[in-house]
Amino acid sequence: MPKTNTLVKICGLTSEEQALEVARLGANAIGIISVEESPRYVSAEIKKKIFKTLESLYPKIERVSVVQNCSIDEIIKNFLGCPSETIIQLHGDEDIDYCKRIKEKIPNIGLWKAFRIKSEKDLDKIKPFEEFVDAILLDSWNRETYGGSGKKIKSIYLKNIEFSKPWWLAGGISIEWIDEIIRDIKPNGLDISSSIEISPGLKDIKKTEALIKFLKKN
C-alpha cells in the first residue's frame, strides 16, 4: 500500500504529561473535551495550561477544544483571555446559524463541525454546512453519548463520499480498520480516542504509539 498523508488527531486527553507524549509521537492534532458531562472533561484552566505548553514546544500541532451545544459567549469566556486553541470543534446539535455566528465572533480560530452518522441519509444534511466550517468530522451515532463511544460508522456509508472541505473520520478507529479506511474511505484525517484508552481520558501510550506508527508507515 502506498504511503499516505492521513492526519492523526488524538482526542480526549486530560493531562499535560500525556499531551506531550502524544505530541512527541507525531500526532497532528490534540483534542481536549470542554463538555462537563463527559468523563474526559478538562476545566478551562487546565486546558489552557496544556495548550500553552503545546504551543511553546510543539507549535505546529493543532490544539482542538471540543464543545457541545455551548453558548458562544461561554466559549469566549473559557478562553481566559487570549485563546490558546487553534480549533473549535462543535460536537453537538449546532445549526448553520450558530456556525455563521461563531465564525463572525471568533474569525481567527478554525471551526470544525462533527456530525453523528446513524444512516446514509445523515450524510445529506452536511452539504449546507460546508460553506461555514473549515473541516467536517464524521462520528458514529450513539444514544448515550455524543462521542467517544468506540462504535464504528458502517463502512458502506463512507465509500465514495466527497466534501469541499477536509474531513476527519472518528468512531472506533483501530489498527485492524486502518487498511480499509486508507484504501476505500480515504478521509483527510483520523480522530482517535476510546480505542487507545486504559480508561476515559487516560491513554495507553504504547497502543497510541503502535497505532500512529502503523498509520504513518502505510
Image (tube, rainbow, N blue to C red):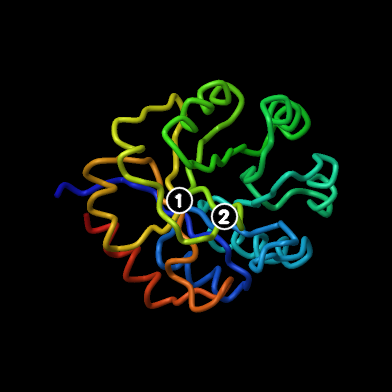
Please report the residue visible at 41 percent of the width from the left and 33 percent of the height from the top: 120
Q: Which quadrant would residue 167 be assigned to in this image? A: top left
Residue closest to the eye, 125 or 14: 125
Q: Amino acid at mark 1?
A: Ala
- Percent x, y for residue 27? 44, 59
SS at mark 2?
A: loop
Q: Position of residue 200 (x, y in %)?
A: 57, 72
Using the image, tell me which numbered label, if any, was put on residue 197.
Answer: none
Q: Quadrant of residue 88?
A: top right
Left-right relation of 197 to 40 = left
The residue that mark 2 highlights is 147
Screen quadrant of the C terminus: bottom left
Camera-nearest residue between 214 and 156: 156
Q: Is residue 171 left or right of residue 77?
A: left
Q: Type of residue at label 2?
A: Gly
Secondary structure beneath label 1: strand
Q: Residue furthest left?
A: 1
In this rendering, the answer to whether 114 lies above or below 54 is: above
Cα distance between the residues tagged 2 and 1: 9 Å
Q: Residue at x 77, y 60 (%)?
A: 44
Q: Are marks 2 and 1 in contact (CB under 8 Å)?
A: yes
Q: Residues within 10 Å of mark 2 (few under 14, many from 20)?
A: many
Q: Which residue is mark 1?
A: 170
- In the depicted view, which residue is nearer to us: 55 or 122? 122
Task: Report the label total.
Answer: 2
Residue 202 locus on image (x, y percent): 55, 75
Category of crowding for the residue at label 1, using alpha-carbon neighbours closer than 10 angstroms: few (below 14), some (14–19), many (at least 20): many
Percent coordinates x, y for residue 49 in the rendering: 71, 66
